[in-house]
Amino acid sequence: MSRIEVLALMSLESEDARTLRAQVASDAFLAERYHFTFSEPAGAAQAAAQAEVIVCGGLPEELLAAAPKLKWIAYWSAGLDGKIPPELRARPIRVTNASGVHGPNIAEHVLAWMLMFTRGMHIHLRAQWDGKWGHGSDRRTGLADELAGQTLGIVGLGRIGEALAIRARAMEMRVLGVKRDPNAHYDTRVLLDAVYGLEGLPRLLSESDHVCVALPATPETQHLFDREMLAHMKHGAFLYNVGRG
């Protein structure tokens, strides 16, 4: 049985390539069924001509045109904004993304921001660099507060939102959420103190000390956070946007 040709648009020496190669080598099914070629986009035309699968973060149109056997594009990014040109729509090619794969990573990044501001680390580090010593009077000037007992509002309860909720609950925070369908879950083990539909966003903003926006880019979410919506936020609250721009 001939193996399926896969073109991975990454340098053979990159960390991503090493991880992928190790994963394939450790899986007998993948190693037997798929042959992987690694190449930077600029030198990938020859490999693209034989590829049935392309793994990439973005696919230049000239490579798409050079890949007549292509059946599947596997993007390693979650968002596909601007990555589906008309030429691709006109061909029977399967397109997948990596939605959800970055959930834990981004959730921990948001948690790091929350800890930084709550503990006043952004102030302390600047003072350390400047060789100064002092005590602040509130969160914005260096007072070390605690996340426990504060309220986190998560706008968009997808994989990122649920991963953040798990971590915030572990910090003994009160966690609220806004979701298009409050009854839908990826992980039923994720427990929040309250989940609202989009109409409940003003209420969530008014109660939250920290607000994380993890929404997809849709006509419904475009310009959702305007001056009027932001006016519902508590004085001194923090807003973190990890959504689609």
Image (cartoon, rainbow, N blue to C red):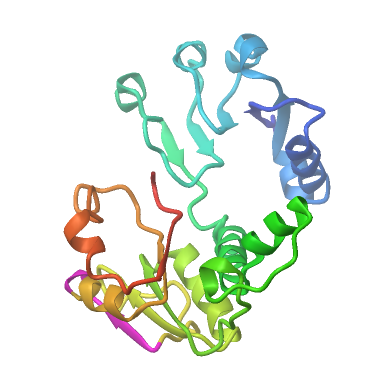
Q: Quick check: 143 left or right of 129? A: left
Which span is picked out in magenta? 193-199
Q: Is 16 inside the magenta-drawn segment?
A: no
Closer to the camera, 120 or 72? 120
State the residue at coordinates (61%, 69%): 120
- The number of callouts visible is 0
Quadrant location of the C terminus?
top left
142 in relation to 34, above or below: below
Q: Nearer the viewer, residue 89 or 2?
A: 89
Q: Is residue 27 above or below residue 172?
A: above
Horizontal side, residue 210 vs residue 4: left or right = left
Q: Position of residue 33 (x, y in %)?
A: 70, 39
Among the 4 quarters of the image, the one containing residue 17: top right
Q: In screen coordinates, is 169 left or right of 17?
A: left
Q: Name the spot of residue 105 as percent of width and height, x first.
A: 62, 59
- Residue at image position (51%, 85%) is 173
Residue 175 in percent (x, y) is at 43, 82
x and y percentages locating residue 164 in the rendered image? 52, 71
Asked if the stretch drawn in magenta spans residue 195, the answer is yes
Q: Is residue 228 above or below residue 57?
A: below
* Image quadrant in which the N terminus is located: top right
Q: Which quadrant of the view contains residue 224?
A: bottom left
Residue shown at the point (47%, 17%) measured from the top left: 64
Residue drawn 76% across and 51% down? Answer: 129
